[in-house]
Amino acid sequence: MDDANPAGAKCLEDDVIPEGHRGPLIDRCQPSRCGNSIVAPAHLPIWTAERASLNELLATPKLPPNRRALLKDHLSEVDLVIRKAGP
């Protein structure tokens, strides 16, 4: 994302930008959804640790169904990022 030229930045597309804000809107900047987001090999350990944490949480037997669904959705996004960045 180039602050001087945000055209094409999915994190800013059709959104109201708060006055004075610079950079991506973090809640919308997701590597699984944005072709402009780059995940380098150096980032993969962070993403694989996130996947491990999510799998550990999903192994919790008494996890509420709505929380489990949210975690599964996030795990799908993490897996997509890892596949995109993989060798």
Image (cartoon, grey):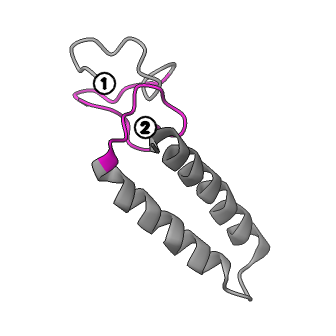
Element carrying mark 1: loop
Q: Are marks 2 and 1 in contact (CB under 8 Å)?
A: yes
Give how far across and how far down residue 1 sits, in percent. Answer: 30, 24
Question: Can you say which quadrant of the picture contains the C terminus?
Answer: top left
Disc number placed over residue 35 in the picture, else none? none
Looking at the image, is 15 positioned above or below residue 54? above
Give how far across and how far down residue 78 sits, in percent. Answer: 54, 53
Q: Would you say residue 74 sits in the magenta stretch?
A: no
Magenta-highlighted stretch: main secondary structure?
A: loop
Image check: 69 left or right of 77?
right
Residue ID at (71%, 82%): 63
List the residue tagged with mark 2. 29
Residue ID at (43%, 14%): 8
Task: Point out the stretch of residues depicted in magenta.
Answer: 15-41
- Closer to us: 15 or 28: 28
Disc 2 marks a residue whose amino acid type is Cys
Q: Is residue 32 visible?
A: yes
Q: Which is more N-terminal, label 1 or label 2?
A: 1
- Closer to us: 1 or 41: 41
Looking at the image, is 54 positioned above or below residue 84? below
Q: Is residue 31 visible?
A: no
The answer to which image quadrant residue 49 occupies is bottom left
Q: Classify 10 Å Cα crowding around label 1: few (below 14), some (14-19), many (20 and above).
A: some
List the residue tagged with mark 1. 1
- Closer to us: 73 or 18: 73
Disc 1 marks a residue whose amino acid type is Met
Give how far across and how far down residue 62 sits, in percent. Answer: 74, 88
- State the CA–CA distance, disc 2 to disc 1: 10 Å
Residue lying farthest front?
87
Residue ID at (38%, 42%): 26
